[in-house]
Amino acid sequence: MRQMNSAVLNAADASSSQTSITINSADLHLASAQVVITGTAAGAVKLQASNDAPTSGAVSNWSDISGATVSVSGAGAYLIPKLDVCYNHLQAVFTRSSGTGTITVNVHLIGYA
């Protein structure tokens, strides 16, 4: 069994919208994400997927994963529950609506490799 934990956004500035690093999620089947906000930042965090070739270099085609969005409003921890994944790449996107602070997005993935 293969497990991966990654802070795809790590104490990023939440006074503006942010896009995380890309995770190579080939051969991974389950994912969840926990979002940690400090300060007064509010907005939404969603997971996106791409099936661009794993070795294509820059990933350019992203789609929102249905049901993988959470609204955030101020300091606290927020969860995107476990979901099935069958994609080559994942990323998290924070769309800010107001406030300031920091945002961390921790993604946990499980699969077989």
Image (cartoon, helix red, strand yellow):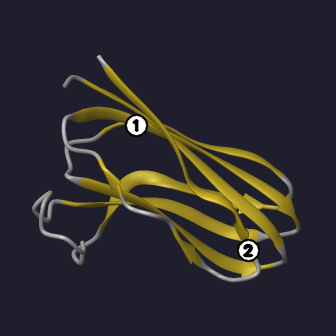
| Residue at image location 85% in from the left, 59% down from the top | 38
Check the picture and name the quadrant holding the N terminus. Answer: top left
Q: Which of marks 2 and 1 is in front?
A: 2
Q: Distance between the residues labelled 2 and 1?
A: 24 Å
Check the picture and name the quadrant holding the C terminus. Answer: top left
| Residue at image location 45% in from the left, 64% down from the top | 21
Left or right: 24, with 70 as reference point: left
In the rendered view, tell whether residue 62 sits above or below residue 92: below
User: Percent from the top left, x then y, of residue 49?
Assistant: 29, 59
The label number, if any, that marks residue 13 in the structure image: 2
Left or right: 85, with 21 as reference point: left
- Earlier sequence position, callout 2 versus callout 1: 2
Left or right: 73, with 51 as reference point: right
Query: Of the residues shown, which amino acid type is indicated by label 2?
Result: Asp
User: Percent from the top left, x then y, of residue 98?
Assistant: 78, 80
The label number, if any, that marks residue 80 in the structure image: none
| Residue at image location 27% in from the left, 41% down from the top | 85
Task: Check the image and name the residue furthest to the right.
Answer: 39
User: Percent from the top left, x then y, of residue 99?
Assistant: 84, 77
Secondary structure type for disc 1: strand
Secondary structure type for disc 2: strand
Crowd rating for badge 1 (residues with CA inside 10 Å; few <14, some 14–19, many 20+): many
Could you say which quadrant of the image residue 40 lies in? bottom right
User: Percent from the top left, x then y, of residue 53?
Assistant: 10, 62
Q: Out of 79 and 25, give the one closest to the viewer.
A: 25
Query: Of the residues shown, which amino acid type is indicated by label 1?
Result: Ala
Left or right: 54, with 49 as reference point: left
In the rendered view, tell whether residue 83 sits above or below residue 63: above
Name the residue carrying label 1. Answer: 31
